Image (spheres, rainbow, N blue to C red):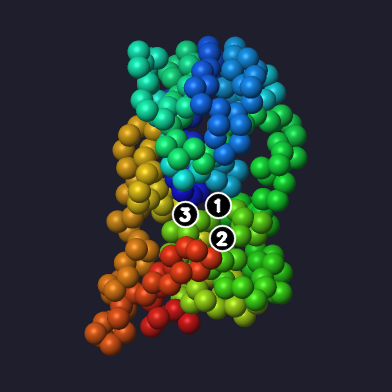
């Protein structure tokens, strides 16, 4: 699933291609995504101007001049690509096509776990997608005091708390492992045991790693591709994710004794960490 850096990369690429464009038409070939695409989707956006691309959590938002916002969530396998003109034949799993005077947006989703919905721009925070969304990683209100207040009564593992979108939004499985590695915190630790200094480290490395990942175009592990068809490159900078059995970059332990980077399953998802450095 695209996480915050991947969604930010997609948003920036789409903005460069079609920001300020007028929507000429839309075609919904398959409305049955995770939620049904609105039956009047094409009618409501036709003729509107794209005035801004932005992101909330893992959602890409396309604000229109008619007071509506197109809400995109890419699920497990959703991808966007931009074509210069409408193709005579679309690709398999091209479910939604938005034609503008600057290019054509194709939404392709093999598994159909994504979302393409409409919301009122002025009331977007009241939309059901965003009612329980936590602070953005760069929100000034994301402080050690805030984070400690959210973790204080949680017995669950800190890794699972980082995945909780009601606390900090946008962090997914890949980056949670990387953040905890850089912060030197073991992922199984109970959330309530995190200290103020450790909370500060989590916030610092959350911002730093996400910024690094955005600069690298995100991480391509399975399905993710940027709208221009290129992959992301941050996977080349992963310290622990998907590196079970290998030595982490900051460790000089005897790998024959420690077994190197370990892999465990938390909440049905793989977690990777260094048992020597993370406490």
Q: Which label was assigned to residue 124? A: none
Q: Residue at x 65, y 19 (%)?
A: 40
Observer-nearest of 251 and 263:
263
Q: Are marks 1 and 2 in contact (CB under 8 Å)?
A: no
Which tag is nearer the camera, tag 2 or tag 3?
Answer: 2
Q: Is 115 placed left or right of 179 in the picture?
A: right
Residue 49 in which image quadrant: top right
Which tag is nearer the camera, tag 3 or tag 1?
Answer: 1
Q: Which label was assigned to residue 163? A: 2
Determine the secondary structure under disc 1: loop
Q: Which label was assigned to residue 170? A: 1
Pinpoint residue 81: horizontal percent, then vertical percent. Answer: 40, 29
Q: Residue at x 36, y 67 (%)?
A: 240
Q: Is 78 placed left or right of 131 in the picture?
A: left
Q: Give the Cα distance between marks 2 and 3.
A: 14 Å
Q: Earlier in the sequence, mark 3 or mark 1?
A: 1
Height in image: 225 above or below 213?
above
Pinpoint residue 192: horizontal percent, then vertical percent. Answer: 65, 77
Q: Earlier in the sequence, mark 1 or mark 2?
A: 2
The residue to which callout 3 is attached is 210
Q: Are marks 3 and 1 in contact (CB under 8 Å)?
A: yes
Pinpoint residue 77: horizontal percent, then vertical percent. Answer: 43, 42
Q: Give the Cα distance between marks 1 and 2.
A: 8 Å
Height in image: 268 above or below 217?
below
């Amino acid at each position: 699933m695209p996480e915050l850096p991947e969604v930010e990369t997609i948003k920036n690429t789409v903005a460069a291609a079609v920001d300020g464009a007028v929507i000429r038409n839309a075609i919904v070939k398959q409305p049955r995504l995770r939620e049904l695409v609105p039956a009047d989707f094409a009618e409501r956006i036709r003729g509107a101007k794209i005035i801004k691309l932005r992101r909330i959590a893992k959602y890409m938002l396309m604000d229109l001049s008619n007071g509506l916002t197109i809400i995109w969530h890419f699920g497990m396998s959703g991808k966007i690509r931009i074509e210069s003109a409408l193709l005579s034949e679309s690709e398999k799993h091209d479910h939604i096509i938005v034609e503008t005077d600057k290019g054509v947006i194709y939404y392709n989703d093999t598994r159909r776990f994504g979302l393409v919905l409409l919301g009122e721009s002025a009331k977007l925070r009241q939309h059901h997608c965003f009612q329980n969304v936590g602070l953005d990683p760069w929100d000034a209100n994301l402080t050690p005091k805030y984070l400690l207040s959210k973790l204080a009564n949680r017995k669950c593992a800190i890794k699972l708390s980082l995945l909780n979108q009601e606390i900090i939004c946008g962090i997914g499985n890949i980056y949670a492992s990387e953040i905890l590695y850089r912060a030197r915190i073991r992922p199984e630790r109970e959330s309530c045991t995190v200290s103020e200094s450790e909370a500060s480290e989590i916030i610092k490395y959350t911002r730093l790693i996400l910024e690094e990942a955005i600069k690298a175009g995100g991480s391509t592990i399975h399905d993710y591709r940027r709208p221009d068809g290129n992959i992301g490159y941050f996977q080349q900078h992963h310290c622990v994710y998907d590196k079970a059995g290998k030595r982490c970059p900051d460790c000089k332990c005897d790998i024959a004794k420690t077994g190197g980077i370990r892999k465990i399953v938390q909440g049905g998802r793989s977690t990777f960490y260094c048992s020597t450095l993370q406490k």
